[in-house]
Amino acid sequence: MAITALLSAPAGALAESAVSFASGPQDPTATNDSTPTFVFSTGDSAASFECSLDGATPQPCSSPHTTDPLDDGSHRLDVRAGSTGTWSARQFSIDTTAPETVLVSAPPARTRESWARFEFVAGEDGASFECSLDEGAFAGCESPWSRGELAAGRHLVAVRALDALGNRDASPAVAVFTVEAASVSSSGTTLTSGVRMLAQALAENLDGVVRVLGSRETPAILRSGQVSVAGMRALVPGTLTVAAAPGSAGPTVLAGTLSSGAGATGTLTLRPTKAGRALLRRGGSVPVLLTARFTSRGLSMSSSRHVRLVRDWLTLGEARQAVSRELRRGRGARPRRLALTVQTRCGSGCLDIRASWLHRRQRFATSGRVRQLSGRLSANLGAAARQR
């Protein structure tokens, strides 16, 4: 979860408040709504209001007031009646990050046991789970989860975690296996704190692969014949295998394996398969399901994430050009030392960015989205916040 520094109230704020909040998120309970709405009022029904988000310059507003899209983390909304009234503050937190799901135990690819047993964990405390068998509807479940007397043939089980706010893992952990004949049930193992640590490490390694693949153009992958991902961490001796395919039943397009000793950090190399090279040569973007599996001393666990491989990126330099133009022409600012960081790539011609700059010896920051459509650049930025 990204953490945003809590900024002080605008100059002139007083401890007492003439404005009262009727609704809207408030700490200590977070919200998963990135554009929360606040309802407030004062004793004067004809009063006008000014709002300041995270210490930004006050702007006229009205109740109900809905914010621009906000990053995960801590925020504060200050409201006053008129332009000279006392400030009333509402502190709140946003959490839109779903927990990562990791399968710790599942049947092998081919089994004679018809009683399938699954164990799973999430990368966030207090998470609950939903399970699906053979692409049926998801329903609440707990680890360990068992399904008995499965018919002979291929089966698919998907498990997704969700937190207390309802944020669901968009890429459920998936197990695909074939039952060859009915037999006795398996006993499984009990999850321990050590297994949970290994599951968290697997999720972190998968995050690293997603970040690298999310910043590589497909022509570059084809030219080099590989993608290298540094910083893969092993808590115990084991083997990490990562494969990318267009869906759980599609052909593997990228694959790589890394064997490491305890406490080692290594570099995973993913190489395109024959089917992958044919797929990557096509124009446009390629959505794939990325699956990571870690095996160690008889223990096997896996986790999955979606990632999009694209052919032509909107570059950071082009995004900086669009943001600078929007600040100068659209907002009348004269930004100096403009710095941009990429939050996520929302497509081949789309970047979600975080920008900061100097203006009149003050540093400001905002987040937004930059797009490139038909060769034209545009930047849609949120309200600027003054930083200390």
Image (cartoon, helix red, strand yellow):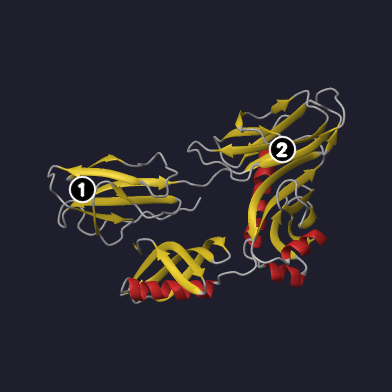
Q: Quadrant of residue 168?
A: top right
Q: Is residue 3 left or right of residue 116?
A: left
Q: Which numbered dot is residue 104?
A: 2
Q: Please give the residue where the numbered disc 1 appears in the rendered image.
A: 15
Q: On screen, 66 above or below 338?
A: above
Dots 1, 2 in contact, CB < 8 A: no
From where the camera sits, is residue 207 visible? no
Looking at the picture, does residue 5 appear above or below residue 129?
below
**Residue 179 position within the rendered picture, expressed as x and y whole percent measured from the top left:** 83, 32
Quadrant of the drawing holding the C terminus: bottom left
Does residue 176 appear in the picture of this structure? yes
Q: Which mark is residue 78?
A: none
Q: Position of residue 137 (x, y in %)?
A: 62, 33
Q: Amino acid at mark 2?
A: Val
- Amino acid type assigned to the residue bearing label 1 in the image: Ala
> Residue drawn at (73%, 41%), measured in percent from left and top?
301
